[in-house]
Amino acid sequence: MSQRTRVRQIVLQILFQEDLNSTDGFDWETFLRDRLQRDRALVQFGNGLLEGVRQRRDEIDQLLQAASANWRVSRMPPVDRNVLRLAVWEMKYTTTPPRVALNEAINLAKRFGGKNSPQFVNGILDRVLKDLSPESGPADVASVVDAPQTL
């Protein structure tokens, strides 16, 4: 597993926890640093992901809502919702290639989500990707969804 994949897993855990429970007073920065063995570059990447999603959560949720005609964001499974938030942040606000962010999100959904999570995440993110860059065609990630998990 790549180091950035590990960072995304940890950030997903933090976002999930914050989404479901009050986390006032918990030191997430130390949590992140300890799990990343104090690697400065990885901690910086993780903090960027975490703070980005936190600061733009409402905007990200609006994009997700627009892309998911039959699902309210609040009714999505919490793991899927936070995988989607993380991926949309990377697709829209970072230099990570959008298809890499999509691939990483599908792998997170495979590892932490339910049986249908990879397909659900793929479908929503494919629509978001089309909305973000109308000139691009549908994401070709069928092989990623059907591939065995390698995490």
Image (cartoon, rainbow, N blue to C red):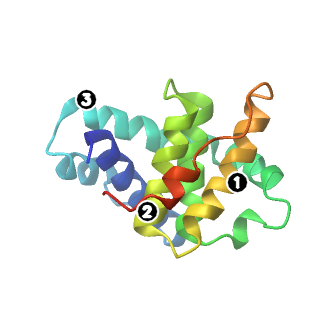
Neighbourhood count class around disc 1 (C-alpha, 10 Å): few under 14, some 14–19, many 20 upward = many
Quadrant of the drawing holding the C terminus: bottom left
Q: Would you name the residue on which mark 2 appears?
A: 24
Q: Where, by quadrant of the figure, is residue 70 drawn?
A: bottom right
In the figure, is residue 33 to the left or right of 54? left
Q: How many tags in the picture?
A: 3
Residue at position x 65%, y 63% in the image: 120
| Nearest to N terminus: mark 3 or mark 1 | 3
Q: Position of residue 1 (x, y in %)?
A: 26, 48
Inter-mark Cα distance, 2 to 3 = 26 Å
Q: Position of residue 47 (x, y in %)?
A: 38, 39
With respect to residue 133, does 12 lie above or below?
Answer: below
Q: What amino acid type should be assigned to the residue bearing mark 1?
A: Ile
Residue at position x 62%, y 42% in the image: 140
| Nearest to N terminus: mark 2 or mark 1 | 2
Q: What amino acid type should be assigned to the residue bearing mark 2?
A: Asp
Pick the residue in front: 119 or 66.
119
Instruction: Find residue 124 and name its label.
Output: 1
Please say if the residues under marks 2 and 3 sit with CB atoms less than 8 Å apart.
no
Q: Would you name the residue on which mark 3 appears?
A: 41
- Element type at marker 2? loop
Q: Position of residue 57 (x, y in %)?
A: 63, 48
Q: What amino acid type should be assigned to the residue bearing mark 3?
A: Ala
Neighbourhood count class around disc 3 (C-alpha, 10 Å): few under 14, some 14–19, many 20 upward = few
Tag nearer the camera, 2 or 3: 3
Pick the residue in front: 60 or 146.
146
Pick the residue in front: 68 or 62.
68
